[in-house]
Image: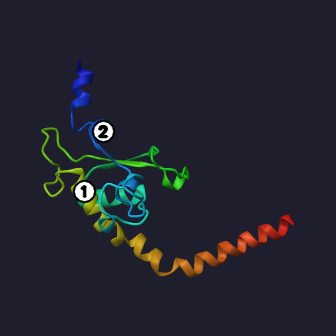
Amino acid sequence: MALARENADPSHKDRWICMYPAYINSKKTAVEGRRITKEKGVDNPTVTEIRDVCQAIGLTAVVENKMYTRELNRDPVFRGRVRVQLKKEDGSPVLDQYPTRKALMIHLGELIPKLKSRTQKQGGSDTSGGGSQDKGKKNKRNRKR
């Protein structure tokens, strides 16, 4: 009996909401799992970005190594989900500005593009990182032949 009450408790991690990156991915269709409009979504979000934004706004978030069932790409980069505590033990929202999962998803779509990791990636890694990776691939090809 005590176990049943523990699972019914909103502060228990099993009662927290699950957030998969596909829910806010603007490159996905609604059939592929996107739950907000493309305009409010973000391109290819990661679980670490979702967790970082949730923790920055004051929500408790935990990353779990799970796979979204609609995800066709089985690459480890696309793996994971974030559990977020939206409600307190009494059922009231932890933060009043995020009473629902949809409100949180829209806010994540606004904040993730503003992360330092996103703004730095757009600035310099395209020119320096891409060239060195291509050279490594060519060297491997030449060695095999």
Secondary-structure class at tag 1: helix
- Judging from the image, the colouring scheme is rainbow
> Which residue: 66% across, 72% down?
133
Where's residue 131, x and y in %? Answer: 64, 78
For marks 1 and 2, give the one nearer the viewer. Answer: 1
Q: Residue at x 57, y 81 (%)?
A: 127
C-alpha gap between disc 1 and disc 2: 17 Å
The dot on residue 19 is: none
Check disc 2: other Cα within 10 Å, few if <14, some if 14-19, many if 20+.
some
Hey, which quadrant is residue 96 in on the image? Answer: bottom left
| Residue marked by disc 2 | 13
Image quarter of the N terminus: top left
In the image, taking residue 135 as reference, residue 64 lies left or right, namely left
Q: Callout 1, which amino acid?
A: Leu
Of 119 and 70, nearer the camera is: 70
Label 1 vs 2, first from the N-terminus:
2
Horizontal side, residue 61 vs residue 138: left or right:
left
Residue nearest the observer in this picture, 105 or 14: 105
Q: Quadrant of the C terminus?
A: bottom right
Q: Which residue bears the numbered disc 1?
A: 104
Q: Residue at position x 24%, y 60% from top?
A: 57
Q: Give the secondary structure at mark 2.
A: helix
Q: Residue furthest right?
A: 145
Please tell me in which quadrant of the rendered image residue 47 appears.
Answer: bottom left
Type of amino acid at the residue the image marks with label 2:
Lys
Q: Is 129 positioned to the left or the right of 109 in the image?
A: right
| Image position, residue 51 (x, y; %) | 35, 55
Residue located 33% across and 65% down the image = 38
Q: Are marks 1 and 2 in contact (CB under 8 Å)?
A: no
